[in-house]
DNA sequence: GTTCGTGCAAACGGTTTGCAACAAT
DNA sequence: ATTGTTGCAAACCGTTTGCACGAAC
């Protein structure tokens, strides 16, 4: 899409075909892919792309504020295009990550912790998705 | 200490010298070491211990419920002897992890999320430690 | 003598880096 | 010509695994 190109430009990123392909993949709101998953998906539309380019591109996106990394799984980081503050739910069985809107959960007391200046926080929940 | 040996036995773990050394290190409440940091520290009292033994021992401790792993840093897991539910604060500058007592922060709404059965949760806070 | 624990080295998976080729301006 | 981008392969780091040695019951 053209708005992907515009979005890259807005963040000071030169829109090359590889970067557009990575952006299109990682900007799907719901997916929370790992870098390797992005590589697998992007290969379909851009078969010559290398792992290094995917990793470097994702790091560039993080640097430029286009996406955020979330440390939610062991061993690997996931990328999240939803850069506004929100919470996360992790399915213990499948590892699937679900975004939880900021207002769905209320947190009190984080601003009155002795000796700590809390600048951001999130609630990390674990459990199971209910069938249905 | 003798109570370390007893604690290992209570968890069904045979107390060998290596395991006692690892336990003494990882049971220091405040430190949240990575596996490699445990290895470095344990070497001082037990110079012949191998990385593999440290890693295997820590995994055994997790399996037996003596410690928990926390996925808070990128690239590596940390071990936490404080197995009861609690929250975490991460210093953005130093990466230092601070335990926050369960009651210091109140969370509301996690039990009424549509389609999700939340079995555990924690608040992950990031910011700076205040000087003084 | 069988079981369990250890140490070494090699393998592993995810990520990064060095470098040469290649656009694009 | 200079600057920035890509692809490859090798390096890298944290972790796991295979296997042979050694200790304990």
Image (spheres, coloured by chain):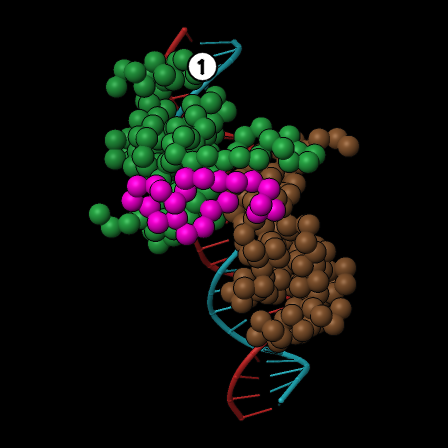
Chain colours: A green, B brown, C red, D cyan
Q: In the rendered image of this protein, does residue A2 appear above or below residue B29?
A: above
Q: What stretch is highlighted in magenta?
A: B101-122
Instruction: Tell me if mark 1 has few (under 14), some (14-19) or many (20+) residues whose alpha carbon lies within 10 angstroms of its own.
Output: few
Count of numbered marks: 1
Query: Residue A73 placed where, x, y %?
Result: 45, 46
Badge 1 element: loop
Residue in the foreground of this view, choosing between D15 and A116:
A116
Residue in the foreground of this view, choosing between B14 and A111:
A111
User: Quick check: is B1 in the magenta stretch?
Assistant: no
The residue at which mark 1 appears reads as: A12
Query: Residue D8 placed where, x, y %?
Result: 40, 38
Quarter of the view holding residue A7: top left
Chain letter, disc 1 residue: A
Residue in the foreground of this view, choosing between C16 and D20:
C16
> Which residue is drawn at the image coordinates 32% and 19% (left, top)?
A4
Query: Residue A33 placed where, x, y %?
Result: 36, 38
Placement of the N terminus of chain A among the 4 image quadrants: top left
User: Quick check: is B111 in the magenta stretch?
Assistant: yes
């Amino acid at each position: 899409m053209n708005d992907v190109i515009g979005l890259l430009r807005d963040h000071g990123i030169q829109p090359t075909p590889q970067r557009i392909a990575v952006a299109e993949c990682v900007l799907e709101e719901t997916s929370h892919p790992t870098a390797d998953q992005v590589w697998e998906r992007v290969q379909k539309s851009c078969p010559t792309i290398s792992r290094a380019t995917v990793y470097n591109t994702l790091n560039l996106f993080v640097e430029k504020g286009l996406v955020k990394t979330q440390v939610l799984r062991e061993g690997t980081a996931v990328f999240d295009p939803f850069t506004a503050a929100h919470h996360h739910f992790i399915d213990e069985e499948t590892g699937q990550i679900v975004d939880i809107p900021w207002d769905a959960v209320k947190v009190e007391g984080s601003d009155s912790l002795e000796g700590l200046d809390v600048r951001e926080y999130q609630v990390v929940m674990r459990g199971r998705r209910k069938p249905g």
